[in-house]
Image: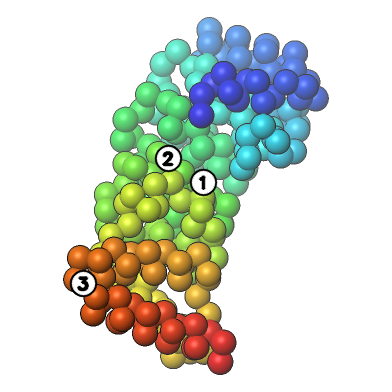
Amino acid sequence: MTPDQLRAALRGVPDPDWLDTALRAVATEPATITRFFPAAGRRCGRHDLPALPGWTADEAARALLLTALPTDHARYADVLYQQGDAAERRAVLKALPLLPVGTAGVPLLHDAIRTNDTRLVAAALGPYARHLDPAAWRQAVLKCVFMAVPLAGVADVDARADGELAVMLAGLAAERQAAGRTMPDDAIDLLDRLTAGRATIAGPAGGSDRADARSDRLSAQEA
């Protein structure tokens, strides 16, 4: 994702002149972003952007405003997140990978992941989540499973998922089986991929164990 892609996707927003004016103002007077940022939903709309799946017009406009800042990106990202409503916070989280903030935005991810807002949690697990340490990232993925947040939206999930996450997922599956509850299909699929990798290393016996484990999970969910 780049600012140019965001700008292209926003062609035809309800008030393009307002957006152009806001971007110029923020580039020359950074403090004005605190006035323009909340207004983006009303001036640019809140509709989904077909050219940017997963983004809405207000999120894209707000991300552009943050990229227009000449300096202090981390400070303004923190201020706008702390003062913003849920939609504004999602925009800040989605903008983080586009900003030169290093790891300064990680506390915002931790805050979002602690909430029960599924859209905030999903936004926190985007590309910027590469800055989360492994333990925090695993806990965040497990929370996605608890909240039925689609794992397809978790950036780099297959690359980062490991044996420890497999153990956590297996434990959750066992708890839900005992309670007569189901696991989301994407979580079962991820666990299968992780145990498949371990079985490949362990040899044929591991494959048999994996098949038995999947059969047990499916039987529990069908019961």
Asked whether, in this view, residue 178 is left or right of residue 18, the answer is left
- Return the mark for residue 123: 1
- Colour theme: rainbow
Residue at 41 percent of width and 16 percent of height: 71
The percent coordinates of residue 219 (x first, y second) are 50, 88
Q: Amino acid at mark 3?
A: Gly
Q: How many marks?
A: 3
Looking at the image, is 137 positioned above or below residue 181? above
User: In the figure, residue 140 lies in which quadrant?
Assistant: bottom left
The percent coordinates of residue 204 (x first, y second) are 24, 75
Q: Which residue is mark 3?
A: 203
Q: Of the residues tagged 3 and 1, which is closer to the observer?
A: 3
Are dots 3 and 2 in contact, CB under 8 Å? no
Residue at 46 percent of width and 44 percent of height: 126
Looking at the image, is 4 positioned above or below residue 136? above
Sort mark 3 into few (<14), some (14-19) or many (20+) by Cα contacts within 10 Å. few
Q: Which secondary structure lies at badge 2?
A: helix
- Return the mark for residue 167: none
Residue at 51 percent of width and 29 percent of height: 1
Mark 3 or mark 2: name the one nearer the start of the chain: 2
Q: Is residue 78 something that shows in the picture?
A: yes
Q: Which residue is mark 2?
A: 127
Disc 3 from disc 2: Cα separation: 34 Å
Q: Which secondary structure lies at badge 1?
A: helix
Residue at 74 percent of width and 17 percent of height: 16
